[in-house]
Image (cartoon, grey):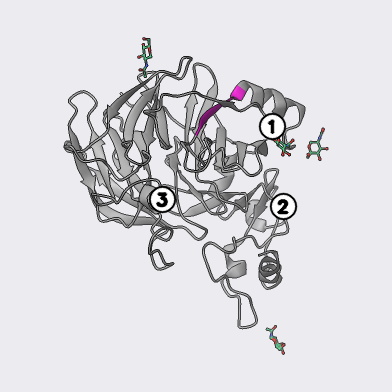
Amino acid sequence: MAALFASFVAFVTFEVAAASNFSPSLPPQSVFIDTRSFTVIGKNGTFRSSTFETTFNPTSTAPPFFQIFDKGFIKVLGSSPSFSEIASTPGFNFAHEAPIYVPETDELFFASKDGHIGEGGNNRVSKISMAEVEAALKKNSTGAFNVTVTPLELSDTIQMTNGGTGPFRSQLLLANSGRGPLPPSIALVNPKPPYNSTILLDNFFGRQFNSLNDVKVHPSGKIFFTDVNYGFLGGFRPTSLMPNQVYRFDPNTGVVRVVADGFDKCNGLAFSRDGKTAFISDSGAIGGDATQMQPTTLYAFDVDSTTHAFKNRRVFAYVDAGIPDGIQLDTNGNVYSGAGDGVHTWDSEGTLLGKFFLGSTAPNMVFAGKGRLVILAETKIYMAKIAAKGFDLGGR
Ligand SMILES: *[C@@H]1O[C@H](CO)[C@@H](O)[C@H](O)[C@H]1NC(C)=O
Ligand SMILES: *[C@@H]1O[C@H](CO)[C@@H](O)[C@H](O)[C@H]1NC(C)=O
Ligand SMILES: *[C@@H]1O[C@H](CO)[C@@H](O)[C@H](O)[C@H]1NC(C)=O
Ligand SMILES: *[C@@H]1O[C@H](CO)[C@@H](O)[C@H](O)[C@H]1NC(C)=O
């Protein structure tokens, strides 16, 4: 991989701080990559052969850093961003999915990928203190450090948490994939000890879901979630019984309905702040009979104002590295998605502004207080302090 990488770099020129469009200077830890510098690689050049094998980094900068493709990204970053590794556990994908920020306690919750009770076990939900992160950053804003990671003891009705948002009604809102015969579910978990939980939904008219993947609250207060057969493909769920699709659940009436289908593997989910636009990532290019001809694509939809059905599906962005995964938006309508080389950011029209470049997979991210973007990267967690801000994800 390193060798391929080196040869790719050799045939592509790029521009750094001197780029005239960005005078007088770029923010710290950033590199401007002029798109014109790689429009032609040429017959002697080395081309990437896969979205998975090599990432696109025609620079000599070591990650983490900001790749700027469009000057709009400078607005996102502000003039004095920082980008640091804040926790790591080599060999354990402790920071995979379901990032939830709880302002009241200034804590961030997330779920691991791997089981922690031996092979085939349940995964683990943990938390970190953002106050502890801030204290460490004060000592060294660019250095890597390890904040304390505190695992939670949750009820065993919570199996293989893969999605999370909120707080919703002051609780964590989780999408659980289920494990073996234990059903996938939408659940509330108290973000404070004793971390008691309440299952809100675990079936569709008596049938178990495939394996729930992600969840978001629409401004109307309805809960939307994606269901995809990754639990079966991962060997921890039985054969799937329904298409991979997106559901709306009304927590007041209990009514569940499908709002979008036709996906290969619907994965991440997010709404614009006004709730009028929905975004779904389709990670069809991994799992099962996947090939690279299947999507690594973010789709945008109009959300019907009364039924909340997803209408007018269109391609929002096709991701060049790995697959698109978790999605968040900022207050300016920019869209962030996890990908195979970090977090990608587009403006509301789907123009790629830049990347929070890690050179490795970042399944999900969340704004954890103003200007703090926390990125889950499997064995590591990163924090970027930037100008952009998130908004309340708890609905009405
Ligand atoms: C491509 O490689 C050939 C053979 O090594 C060399 O003669 C030629 O100058 C190269 N062309 C470019 C544009 O580098
Ligand atoms: C901060 O951390 C970086 C990377 O570990 C190190 O190179 C640098 O010397 C540190 N700075 C201070 C002030 O400790
Ligand atoms: C964080 O702790 C892990 C062991 O749990 C260690 O391997 C890693 O190097 C540490 N990172 C830093 C920046 O100290
Ligand atoms: C946990 O218990 C407290 C106290 O009984 C209750 O207020 C809260 O709603 C419970 N949370 C969940 C998610 O069940």
Q: Is residue 272 visible?
A: no
In x, y percent, where is residue 33? 63, 59
Q: Amino acid at mark 1?
A: Asn
Residue at x-position 62% and y-position 49%: 358
Q: Is mark 1 within 8 Å of ligand 3?
A: yes
Residue 281 in picture, x, y percent from top left? 38, 50
Question: Which numbered tag is attached to residue 327?
Answer: none
Q: Label 2 to label 1, Cα distance in Å?
A: 20 Å
Query: What's under tag 2, amino acid-wise?
Result: Ala
Q: Is mark 2 within 8 Å of ligand 2?
A: no
Between circles 3 and 2, the one closer to the viewer is 3
Instruction: Name the residue that disc number 3 marks.
Output: 235
Q: Quadrant of residue 146?
A: top right
The magenta stretch is: 124-130
Question: Which of pointers 3 and 2 lies earlier in the amino acid sequence?
Answer: 2
The answer to whether the residue labelled 2 contacts the one labelled 1, judged by CB atoms less than 8 Å apart, is no
Q: Earlier in the sequence, mark 1 or mark 3?
A: 1
Give yes or no for residue 126 being in the magenta stretch.
yes
Please name whichever residue, 171 or 125, is drawn nearer the observer in this view of the structure: 125
Q: Amino acid at mark 3?
A: Gly
Disc 1 from disc 3: Cα separation = 32 Å
- Number of the label disc, if any, that sits on residue 146: 1
Q: Relative to 368, does residue 294 appear above or below in the rendering? A: below
State which tag comes first along the sequence, 2 or 1.
2
In the image, taking residue 243 as reference, residue 34 lies left or right, namely: right
Q: Position of residue 290 (x, y in %)?
A: 40, 63
Where ligand 2 lies, by image quadrant? Answer: top right
According to the image, label 2 marks what residue? 62
Mark toward the viewer: 1 or 3: 3
Q: Decide: marks 1, 3 in contact (CB < 8 A)? A: no
At horizontal 56% and vertical 38% (from top left) the residue drawn is 94
How far, Cα to Cα, is label 3 from label 2? 36 Å
